[in-house]
Amino acid sequence: DLLGCIAMSFHLTISFSLTSATSFFPTTQILTLTAMPDVLSKTSEVSLLVAFFATLLNLLYLEPTSTQVMFDRYKLEDDGKRDSDEYKSLAKSFGKFHGISSLTNLIAFCGGIVHAVRLASKLAA
């Protein structure tokens, strides 16, 4: 059980680090919209907006919900109710929210990368 808690702690640290990185990309890249409007393409703008809204969705809804479900599940584990239907329901719900949260992080990260590549290619030309 201790090894599982350590692994979960490490996984959450990595997950929150990725969330911080993906929220940094759109914030920084929004500044390019005002600083260099003639350099941006439609593809770049769309990818930036997708990254921004994916980050907001994750930051304001998916991540807090996932974290709350995780703590509710831990409470049931501590109470010895790991075989209960409620625990199984929470585990399924956590898997769903955590998976969607990871996917939105990946989408935001990819949107930021597309924007950065398009911006760099316009600056190099």
Image (cartoon, rainbow, N blue to C red):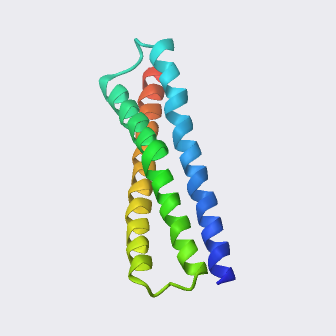
The image position of residue 88, as x and y in percent, is 40, 79
Please provide percent x and percent y for residue 101. 43, 54
Q: Quadrant of residue 54?
A: top left
Q: Nearer the viewer, residue 97 or 24?
A: 97
Q: Position of residue 40 (x, y in %)?
A: 39, 20
Tell me the residue at 56%/50% (across/down): 18
**Quadrant of the frame with the C terminus:** top left
**Foreground residue, 64 or 116?**
64
Look at 37% across and 64% down and name the residue there: 96
Q: Residue furthest front?
A: 79
Residue 63 seen from this side: yes
- Quadrant assignment for the N terminus: bottom right
The answer to whether one can see residue 109 in this image is: no
Above or below, 85 against 47 in this view is below
Q: Is residue 13 left or right of residue 98?
A: right
Q: Is residue 97 above or below residue 32?
A: below
Which residue does the image show at 58% across and 44% down from the upper left? 20
Placement of 5 over or under 120, stated as above or below = below
Tally of numbered tags: 0
Extreme residue toward the left, this view: 42
Q: What's the residue at 37%, 28% (across, down)?
A: 44
